[in-house]
Amino acid sequence: MKILSKASKLIKDNSYNPQNLAISEYYIGKILYNNNDDSFLNTLQTVDSIITETKNVTAELRDTYPILIDYYKKTGNKEKQLFYIEHLLFVDSILNKNNNFLITEINKKYDTPLLLKEKEILISDLNSKNYTLFGILGIGGIIIIYLLYLYDKYKKKVKIYQSKANLLTKSPDYPSTIETNDLSFKENFDLQKEKSKTTLSDDKLNQLSLQLEGFEIEKRFLDKKVNLDILSKEFNTNRVYLSKSVNELKGQNFSQYLNELRIRYILNELKTDKNLQKLTIAAIADKVGYNNAESFTNAFKKMTDTLPSYFIKALQENSN
C-alpha cells in the first residue's frame, strides 16, 4: 500500500503516463475497498476521470466501475449509480473495439444486457421521482397562489374595516346595515305594520310602545338573560303580541332590535370611556349582555361593517 502510494506520488510529480497513474490509483482503491475504507471512492473516481479524459482503458481498469456501481446501489444513490453504468457502457464500447475477439462475447453474454436493463430501470425510477417532484412543486405552487389570493383578500378586508371604523369614530351615529331579506327596509317595515294592525289594537300597541321605551331607558337590554319570553311576561302580554309590536314599532325582529340597542350603547360608551377601550373584546361583550366575544363581534360587524377591535384602534389613534 505504501509502495503504491509512493509510486502514485512519483507519477503525479513527474508527469508520467496517465495510464500508469490510473493503474496505480486503481490498486490503491482496491486495497482501500477491501479494507472497508471509504476513501477508496476518491482513488477510483480519479481512475474514472483519467479514463474519461484519455479514452484509454484496459480490461483490468474496467473493474473500477462494478465497484463504484455496487457502492452507490447499496447507498441508494440512483443518480450516481446511473452515472457509472453509463461510463461502464462507454468503457465496454472502447474495449469491444480494441479486443473484439474476446470482450464482445463476454459483454454480450453477461454484462451488457444486464447493464442496459439496470440502466432502463434506473432511468424509469428517476423519471418517476421527477414526476413526483414536479407534482409536489405544482401542488405547492397552487397552494402558494391560493394563499396569496387569501392574503390579498384579507388585506382588502382589513382596509375596509379600517375605513369603516374611521368613519364610525367621526359620526355621531352609525348607518343601520340590518338585512331585511329581499325587501327594502321601508317595504319590510310597511309590510310588518300592515300585518300587525290586523291583530293589535291601538291601545295595546301604545301600551307596549311605552313599555319598550322604559326598557330602553333603564338599559334592560344589557341583561344577558333578557329574551322575548321573559320580556313578554314582564309586559303582561304574550310573546306573539310583543314580537309583532317590535316588528311594527321598530321595523325589526326582536333579536335585531336587541342587538341594535346593545351595539348603539357600546359605540357611545367606547367613544367616551377610555378605560373601556383598554378591556378585552370578551370583557366588553360581557358588559353589553353577550355570552361570548364571537356573538358580540358578529353583531357588531353586521351593524357597522367593521370589527370592535378596529373601531377601538381607530378611536385610540384619533385620540392620540
Image: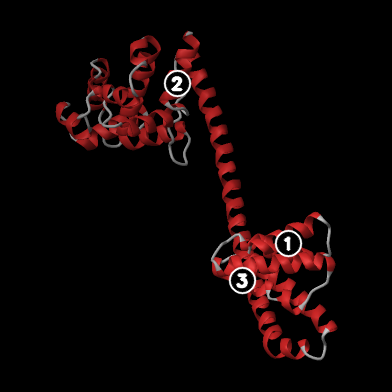
Q: Going from the N terminus, do you reach mark 3 or mark 2 first?
A: 3
- Reading the image, the residue beneath label 2 is 311
- In the picture, the disc for residue 125 is 3
Front-lying residue, 284 or 147: 147
Q: Amino acid at mark 2?
A: Phe
Front-lying residue, 313 or 306: 313
Q: Secondary structure at mark 2?
A: helix
Q: Are marks 3 and 1 in contact (CB under 8 Å)?
A: no
Q: Going from the N terminus, do you reach mark 3 or mark 1 first?
A: 1
Residue drawn where x is 34% and y is 30% of the image:
296
- Residue 128 in view, yes or no: no
Q: Amino acid at mark 1?
A: Ala
Residue 85 x/y as whole percent: 69, 73
Q: Secondary structure at mark 3?
A: helix
Q: Are marks 3 and 2 in contact (CB under 8 Å)?
A: no
Front-lying residue, 144 or 80: 80
Mark 1 → mark 2, Cα distance in angstroms: 85 Å
Residue 168 x/y as whole percent: 48, 18
As displayed, is residue 115 above or below residue 8? below
Mark 3 → mark 2, Cα distance in angstroms: 59 Å
Q: Amino acid at mark 3?
A: Asp
- In the picture, the disc for residue 7 is 1
